[in-house]
Amino acid sequence: MQLRADRVSLDGPHGTLLPSTSLAVADGELALVHGEPGTGVTALGLALAGRLRPTTGTVTVDEVADAAKLRSLVAVVDAPGVSEPDEALSLSVVVGEELALAGQPAAAADVRRWLTAHDLAPYAGTRFERIEPALRIRLLTELAATRAGVAALVLDRPDRHTSEVEDWAMVAHEHAERGLAVLVLTATAAVTALPAPPARIGQHDQPAPQRCRTETAETAEAGAAGDEGETP
């Protein structure tokens, strides 16, 4: 699967929200995007997820413009004012809401099992605002990745929570290694601190995404699928 924005712009009530921007990311790839605060970084993420209609340009998945398909395939993680959790809620409530959103069992016992499996049980009653940034980023990304049918993750400005790039870069890389298309939107981190050259808001010629899913892993996965499909 390839997710592509081709000269996408968005206008708001007071002018340009997102200047014309192009980029692409595919299965097993990690792409970084950088824009100055206030340049419509979140708007780009929502357009890629089929949740905002571009004023100009197109967003496509495998060369097809289909907003409904984008909404089913792309999960936007921790977008301010959109998908970020209420900071006053406890960790257990946030996890329950995310599990329900993913279509998974989300009763109290299910939440306890999930927290225990991820070594988070001691934090169950902790207000979400007190969860350390690295843990916040990891668990919200992991929960989004469990949603049925999700093939792409858009991490919305994890750098607003921490100056430690490694806190989110490793998480993003791990999910791309698993075969997801991963896009990280940044605005606070210095471009020189990013682990790879980023695409830029307002530009069309963008650096190629980082390939994280190895050919060996893809071959092994394809072979396993073939073995499962064989009949005795």
Image (tube, rainbow, N blue to C red):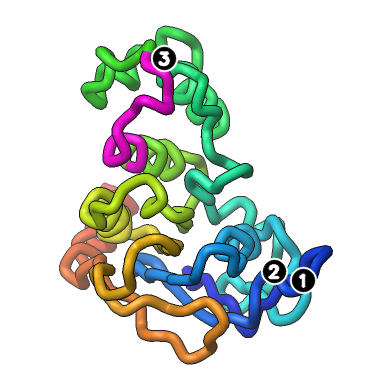
The amino acid marked with disc number 2 is Leu
Label 1 close to label 2 by CB (< 8 Å): yes
**Which residue is most to the bottom?**
205
Main secondary structure of the magenta stretch: helix
The residue to which callout 1 is attached is: 11
Residue 118 in view of the camera: yes
Q: Residue at x 48, y 24 (%)?
A: 94
Q: Nearer the viewer, residue 31 or 159?
A: 159
**Which residue is most to the left?**
216
The amino acid marked with disc number 1 is Asp
The residue to which callout 3 is attached is: 110
Task: Residue 190 in the image: state x and y as whole percent.
Answer: 32, 68
The circle on residue 17 is: 2
Q: Nearer the viewer, residue 189 or 139?
A: 189
Task: Residue 48 in the image: state x and y as whole percent.
Answer: 59, 64
The amino acid marked with disc number 3 is Asp
Please identify the quarter of the rendering in which residue 12 is found: bottom right
Asked if residue 134 is among those painted magenta in the image, a careful observer would answer yes
How many labels, in total? 3
Q: Secondary structure beneath disc 3?
A: helix
| Stretch in magenta | 126-137
Label 3 close to label 1 by CB (< 8 Å): no
